[in-house]
Structures are given as C-alpha cells and as structure tokens.
Image (tube, rainbow, N blue to C red):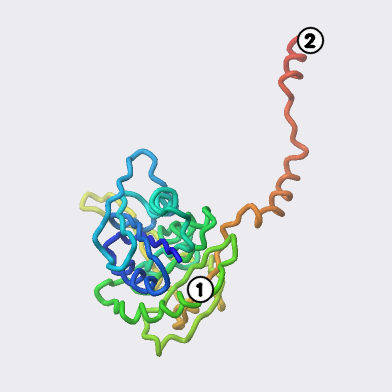
Amino acid sequence: MNILVTNDDGIFAPGVEALTQVLQHFGNVYVVCPDQEKSAVGHANTLRTPLKLTPVDLFPGSKGVWSVNGTPADCVKLGVEVLLKEKPDILFSGINLGPNLGRDIYYSGTMAGAVEASLYHVPAVAVSLQAFKEKKVNYTRVKQLFYHVAEMILQHTIPQGIFLNINLPDLPKDLCKGVEVVPLDMTVSRYRYVGLNDPYGQVYYWLTDHLIQLTEFNRDSDYLKLKEGYITVTPVSVDHQFNNRRKIEQIRKWFKPLSFQTSSSVREESHHA
C-alpha cells in the first residue's frame, strides 16, 4: 500500500512526524508538505510563483520526503502528478495542531489536502488534534489513539465521493470514551473578529478563536462529542455533481421563463428600423 502524507503545519511539525511513524506500520509512506506553516489557507493553489520541490532528510523509514514552497493543495497535486509513479492508495493530511470542526472545513489547509486528493479519486483522511500548545502535547499517546483509528480505516474502503474528517481528543487511551461518527455542526461561529486600538487611535481587527469559550452545541455533533472525550469521525462529501443534481434541476426552473433575443433577431429588428 502506498500512502501519501501532507499537512498545513509545515514539514517540521511534530504532528506530521507522529502521523508518518504510525502509517509506516501499514505501508509505504511518501511525505509532501509545505516548507512552512500554511494554516487557514483553504484550498489555495500557487499560480504566479514557481514551486520548488526539496528532498528533506526526515522521517526514517519513509520512501520519500519533500518540502514545497506552496500550499497543502499544491503538495498533494505535486505528489500525485509528479512525484509518485502511480496514484497513491490513500492520503492522510495532518496531524493538525488544533481541531477542525464544523465550518473549519472551508478554511483549513488540512482539509484542503484531503479534498485535493479526493478530486483525483484518492481516498483521503484529515486528522486533527484537540490541542493548541505544541510543547504540552504528548505525541506518544496521540500515536496510540491514532493507530487504532488508522488500522480500522485501512481495513475498509472509504466510499467514493467523500473524505473522512477525524478529530482526536488530547487524552490518554484509557480516558478516551470511544469513537463517534457524527455530522459537522455548521451552526457554530468559532472564529470572531476582535477590534484593537493602536497608539494613534486606529482600530485594527484580529480573527480570534473562541472555541474554549463556546458552550452551546448541537447534541450529536462533532463539537460536543469531541469535547466529551470521543474521537470524532465525519464523512464529508466532495461529490458535488451527485449531491447537487436535484438542486440543479430546481434552480434550472427559475430561469426557464427568461429568454434573450438571438443575434439574428437583433439584426432583423435593426434592418426593419
């Protein structure tokens, strides 16, 4: 099994090292990550800057490790189209420092790596950790939790048209309550702007994370279950054509009454005038 790995915290992040060490138990691991942190870049691709692939001497046991001066989506695209001789069997993106919940899927570079793989019909998994301070994370216990999740995923086939969004609680294995497969809670506004005055009275705005202060969540959602100590697994659809077919027909009806004159009818009217 050939496994492609990426992240958005950068090639030197401890989370990608932990992810790689676990996945080496299951197959051949290839790592392609940004050369620096690219959090919250979403699904951006680099258009006007040349991309450089740099081999990196990291993660012993891996089949190849590269850093890229680009985004997670760039990394996956290069991995699939340039670096690997054949399409990988699966992609894992992470382990991200900080959870990815609800609306985060639209902003997260970790999510973008999984989405990009899915566009190539490569099964994909995004993995994040409910922790924010790198120095306080015990990656030995993180790897223990993730090993069991990875083992279960790799024993099955991820349905086409989705990727899996996994969030791990920052807990030892014996305190973790189990695994919950849950929907995203899209009702929560986690990130909010805070205004600050500079010495000259000008107001600037910073986007701040209010996750710790949040208290109200949907009962069976990713936010609440992760907070309660569960590993959360959320299937996220990327098969827009299939899922929007009914809506396409619905909206198509809006425009049926709308018609425009053809160019020939316009010329005919001009001639008669």
Q: Which comes sooner in the sequence, label 2 or label 1?
A: 1
* Left or right: 88, with 203 as reference point: right
**Distance from label 2 to label 1 (Cα)?**
71 Å
Tag in front: 2 or 1 = 1
* Left or right: 70, with 85 as reference point: left
Q: In the rendered structure, which amino acid carries the disc numbered 2?
A: His
10, above or below 47, in the image: below
In the foreground, 201 or 31: 31
Q: Secondary structure at mark 1?
A: helix
- Tell me residue 74's x, y (percent): 39, 50
- Tell me residue 75's x, y (percent): 38, 53
Q: Secondary structure at mark 2?
A: helix
Q: Residues within 10 Å of mark 1 (few under 14, many from 20)?
A: few
Q: In the rendered structure, which amino acid carries the disc numbered 1?
A: Ile
Residue situated furthest bottom in the rendering: 174
> Which quadrant would residue 143 be assigned to in this image?
bottom left
- Tell me residue 88's x, y (percent): 46, 59
Q: Quadrant of the C terminus?
A: top right
Label at residue 153: 1
Task: Tell me, yes or no, if residue 256 can be seen here.
Answer: yes
In the foreground, 84 or 45: 84
Residue identifier under label 2: 272
* Left or right: 44, with 197 as reference point: right
Label at residue 76: none
